[in-house]
Image (cartoon, rainbow, N blue to C red):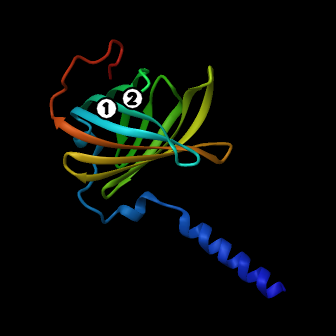
Amino acid sequence: MSGIVSKSLWLSAFLVAGCSNSVQDYSGKTPALHLDEFFNGELVAHGIVQNYRGKVIRQFNAEINAEWQGQNGLLDEKFFFDDGEQQNRCWRLRKTGNQYTGTAQDVVGVAEGATAGNALNWRYTLKVPVNGKIRHINFDDWLYLVDENNLINRAKMSKFGFTVGEITLYIRKISNEPKYPFTTGCTI
C-alpha cells in the first residue's frame, strides 16, 4: 500500500510542477514583445469573459490609446460590454529592463510583470464590481505577441486561490498614432 501512496505522491508532485508556467519559458520565442513598441498608438481589442466553469458570460470590445515617454508608458483603455456597460482604465506603466510595474485607478497596489521572448506575465489585484459590491480579484495575465500588429491576452482570475473566471482577448495595433485625445486625467 505504501508503494501506491508514494507513487501517487510522486505523480501529483510531478503534475503540479509541470503545470507552473514561467515567463522565461518563452525567452527564445519570436517576435520579441516590447510593450513600449506594441502599446504605442491606436489599438483595438475584442474579448470574452468566462466564469469558473468556462461558460462565456460577457463579450466586449475596447479602444486603447497608448504612448511612451522614455521608460514611462500610458494606456488609456475604453471597454464596451455587450450588456451596455462601459469602463475606462488608465494604466501608468514603468519599464526597467524587461521588468514592468503599473498602476491604475482600480488596481490594488502595484501590478508587476516581466517579458521574455514574445510573452509578458503580469500579476495584479483588480477591484471588480460584483452584485453591487467591490471584490478584489487576483489576475494572472499573459500576453503573447503573434506578430508586430497582433497580440493574444489570456488572464486567469482567482479569489482565495480558486479560479473564478478567465478573460481572453485579441488586441490589434491599428496605428502608431493615438486616435483620440486621452481621457481627462489620464497623463504620464
Q: Is residue 48 left or right of residue 107?
A: left
For label 1, the crowd category at 10 Å Cα-Cα, with few meaning under 14, some 14 to 19 and many 20 or more, is many
Q: From the viewer's perspective, is residue 111 above or below residue 151? A: above
At a point 27% along the width and 18% down the height, the residue shown is: 182
Label whose residue precedes the other's in the sequence (2 or 1) = 1
Label 2: element kind? strand
* Picture coordinates of residue 61, whole percent (x, y): 33, 31
Q: From the viewer's perspective, is residue 81 above or below residue 71? A: above
Q: Quadrant of the N terminus?
A: bottom right
> What amino acid is labelled 1 in the image?
Gly
> What amino acid is labelled 2 in the image?
Trp
The tally of labels here is: 2
For label 2, the crowd category at 10 Å Cα-Cα, with few meaning under 14, some 14 to 19 and many 20 or more, is many
Q: Label 1 near label 2: C-beta < 8 Å? A: yes
At a point 32% along the width and 30% down the height, the residue shown is: 62
Of 110 and 135, the residue lying toward us? 135
Q: From the viewer's perspective, is residue 87 above or below residue 149? A: above
Q: Which mark is residue 113?
A: none
Q: Quadrant of residue 168?
A: top left
Identify the residue position indicated by label 1 in the image: 73
At a point 37% along the width and 25% down the height, the residue shown is: 80
Q: Which mark is residue 91?
A: 2
Residue lying at the far top of the rendered structure: 184
At a point 72% along the width and 83% down the height, the residue shown is: 7
